[in-house]
Image (cartoon, helix red, strand yellow):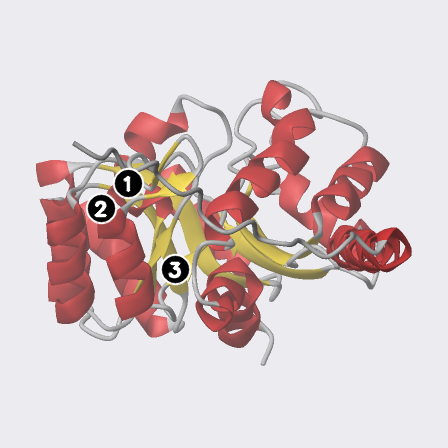
Amino acid sequence: MIRRVPTRPPHTVVPPLNLSFFLRVLCVLCVSALGVAAVRAEAPKLPIFDAHVHYNYDFGPPIPIEQVFELWREAGIRGVLLTSRPNDGTRDLLESAPAEFKAVAFARPYVVMADVQTWFRDPGIYAMIERELARGVYRGIGEFHIYGKDADSDGFARFVRLAKDKTLWMHAHCDEYVIQRIYSLYPQARVIWAHTGMGTSEQRIDELFARYPSLYGELSYRGGIDDGGTLSPEWRTLFTKYPDRFLLGSDTWVPPRWPEVPQIMARYRTWLSQLPPEVAEKIAWRNGFRLFFD
């Protein structure tokens, strides 16, 4: 028996490496990468309209007023909706804000924290709001808190009629029952829904937005939008379906909240960056500017 000796595959000749060419390509790639990184680093932050600012005086001024403006600059805030307890804080910010910040003010039906529970039943609060509105600087009433069947009261209906008579916005921290009650009393109402119901389901928000075209959702403290910075599919759907109906907010309701404002806005920008640019811009600032300054 004759054994066949296996033949080796033909040797492949590899051309020698052109080291200088390789180094040139590597340098070009590195420079390009650095250039892209530099452009990204220098890209301006997406401007913000903050639709939920409180400068509350009932526990004393939260921070010096100049520090408010410094925090807004650091956060990239260019426009604000002011509403404070009592309204002196709102007027002080409105009168002191530099021209770089656009500001709109709402009259809040509180003097002290305890008014949160009783404002709509208190004739003194209604009279106070009438006096505040006579100043001619307010575009709305709120932020106010009210839930469930309290919205069926004559006192609350009186405030809704006031908003109707003077064509004022309403900034409501409430449940969906109250939203429906407002629109039953005033079908043309313009409502900013503080926290967009806080925990109202995405499906229900969709239904309410479809039913009430002048209902806008403010997003401070709103749960479920993202998970560790990743935008949820449900909220992506809502934002792309209703890009003209959402606003951002800081909700500086207690003094420790103020130093957090830049970080709050940075977290918003994280999930905004996952939306189409035109949608992100509307939610970040264009909606607020369109509603109050155009």
The furthest residue to the front: 1
Q: Which residue is mark 2?
A: 155
Q: Residue at x 28, y 38 (%)?
A: 4
Give yes or no for contact between labels 3 and 2 (Cβ–Cβ under 8 Å). Answer: no
Sequence-first disc among 1 and 3: 1
The quadrant in which the C terminus is found is: bottom right
Asked if labels 1 and 2 touch by Cβ distance under 8 angstroms, the answer is: yes
Q: Callout 2: helix, strand or loop?
A: helix
User: Residue 179, percent across and down?
Assistant: 18, 53
Q: Which residue corresponds to mark 1?
A: 120
Q: Could you tell me the amino acid type at mark 1?
A: Phe
In this orientation, does residue 194 appear?
yes
Measure how far apart labels 2 and 1 are at the Cα level: 5 Å
Q: Residues within 10 Å of mark 1 (few under 14, many from 20)?
A: many
| Residue 277 position in % (x across, y down) | 51, 68
Question: Is 20 drawn above or below residue 114 in the view shown?
Answer: below
Taking the view exactly as shown, the residue that stands out farthest to the right is: 20
Instruction: Answer left or right for 285 relative to 189.
Output: right
What residue is shown with label 3?
246
Q: Nearer the viewer, residue 102 or 181?
A: 102
> Quick check: 39 above or below 11?
below
Q: Could you tell me the amino acid type at mark 3? A: Phe
Mark toward the viewer: 3 or 2: 3
Q: Nearer the viewer, residue 182 or 194?
A: 194
- Separation of residues labelled 1 and 3 (CA atoms): 27 Å
Residue 70 place in picture, x, y as percent = 82, 40
